[in-house]
Image (cartoon, rainbow, N blue to C red):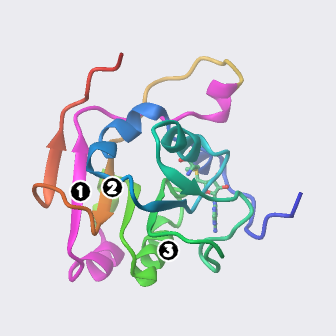
Amino acid sequence: MAKRKFPTLHKFNDMYTPPEALDYIVPYLDKSLWYWEACFGKGHMAYELVRRGFEVIGRPELDCLNSVPFSRWDFLITNPPFSNNKKFLARFIELGKPFATILRLEHLGGVKALELLTNLDFCVIIPEHRINFITPKMMRGEKVGGAQYHSIWLTYGVDLPRQINYVKTPERK
Ligand SMILES: C[S@@+](CC[C@H](N)C(=O)[O-])C[C@H]1O[C@@H](n2cnc3c(N)ncnc32)[C@H](O)[C@@H]1O
């Protein structure tokens, strides 16, 4: 397997997306588009989107800060590492295509956020409940507590009803 081009990340970055995080955004996503899961990780988000009928591409070894896929992609969707997340946000904006990225709510604030977002026609989805990400500990079957922070979807080029959208947690079957 090809070697990763990006440095090993600290533990907070290996927080994978559970299916319920997608419940908040999927109703607003266009199934005719091709999605690039840019920070693929172990594929939790990508495989869940595929399961829900989306066309998704992505590879764990592709460094999204410096490369883009060769194949077609219309929309970037991801949950990037928490550390240096503004670098990722800047990159997604720079690419100029529609995107949806998970972000900690508190990361909407700060000098860099102001610089990146002041003139961007972005929207946010604020889920009713905190998202409990899948951690390596959880995957080993160890007991873990709930999320200590609130996460949001930050979107660009998605047709949402308002700029700030509070979304109730849908009932899961
Ligand atoms: C918070 S995890 C989420 C993984 C996946 N997006 C998900 O939703 O389950 C962030 C992932 O980004 C990956 N990553 C870190 N730097 C990256 C880069 N420059 N390009 C692409 N992926 C990167 C890490 O390996 C990590 O698996």
Tell me the crowding category of disc 3: few under 14, some 14 to 19, or many 20 or more residues within 10 angstroms, Cα based.
Answer: few
The image's mark for residue 124 is 1
**Could you tell me if residue 148 is visible in this image?**
no
Q: Compute the Cα span from label 3 to label 1.
A: 19 Å
Q: Compute the Cα span from label 3 to label 2.
A: 26 Å
Classify mark 2 as within 8 Å of ligand 1 or not, answering yes or no: no
Dots 3, 1 in contact, CB < 8 A: no
**Vertical order, 75 against 24 (above or below):** below
Give the amino acid type for the residue marked by disc 1 in the picture: Val
The quadrant in which residue 9 appears is: bottom right
Q: Is residue 129 magenta?
A: yes
Give the amino acid type for the residue marked by disc 2 in the picture: Asp
Say whether disc 2 or disc 1 marks the residue closer to the N-terminus. 2
Q: Is residue 113 magenta?
A: yes
Please state the extent of the stretch shown in magenta in the rendering: 110-139
- Which numbered mark, 2 or 1, is in the foreground of this view? 2
- Which numbered mark, 3 or 2, is in the foreground of this view? 2
Q: Which residue is mark 3?
A: 87
**Where in the figure is residue 13, as x and y percent of width and height?**
59, 51
* Secondary element at image label 3: helix
Q: Quadrant of the N terminus?
A: bottom right
**Where in the figure is residue 88, as x and y percent of width and height?**
50, 70
Q: Which residue is mark 2?
A: 30
Q: Compute the Cα span from label 2 to label 1.
A: 17 Å
Residue positioned 46% across, 33% down in the render: 19
